[in-house]
Image (cartoon, rainbow, N blue to C red):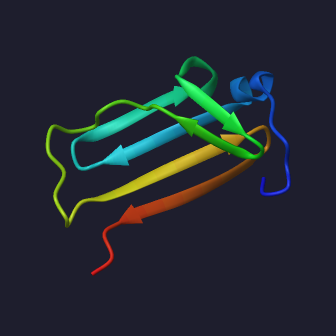
Amino acid sequence: MKDLELSQGDLHNIDIKFEGRDGLITGNVGDMVTKIKGNVISFLVGTVNNETYKEDEYKIKIKFKDKQDVIRLQLLK
């Protein structure tokens, strides 16, 4: 989706799963607080856990129309 210009209407085609130590959050980006700048979308998912530790790892699965990608987040040591 690097070269894709997104519109507000496209946001309803993006589903996410955010997995952390304390649980899984699923949702549609169109239902979230968002900001679009070119092909970059900022969205507010919510708080997964009350405290974050440096050993925590998170996984975000993003599905847009017929494509999907998984991004793993962790602190680099």
Residue name at image x 80 percent, y 37 percent? 6
Instruction: Determine the residue located farthest toward the top in the rendered image.
Output: 31
Quarter of the picture holding the C terminus: bottom left
> In the picture provided, is 42 more to the left or to the right than 48?
right
> In the figure, 64 relative to 7: above or below?
below
Residue name at image x 57 percent, y 18 percent? 31
> In the picture provided, is 21 more to the left or to the right than 67?
left
Instruction: Determine the residue located farthest toward the front in the rendered image.
Output: 37
Q: Which of the two residues, 66 or 39, is positioned nearer the viewer here?
A: 39
Instruction: Determine the residue located farthest toward the bottom in the rendered image.
Output: 77
Residue 64: percent from left, percent from top: 73, 40
> In the picture provided, is 28 more to the left or to the right than 45?
right
- Residue 25 lies in what quarter of the image? top left
- Residue 62 lies in what quarter of the image? top right
- Residue 28 lies in what quarter of the image? top right
Residue name at image x 51 percent, y 27 percent? 27
Residue 66: percent from left, percent from top: 79, 43
Q: Which of the two residues, 2 or 56, is positioned nearer the viewer here?
A: 2
Residue 20: percent from left, percent from top: 30, 48
> In the figure, 70 relative to 42: above or below?
below
> In the picture provided, is 50 more to the left or to the right than 68?
left
> In the figure, 40 relative to 7: above or below?
below
Residue name at image x 24 percent, y 60 percent? 56
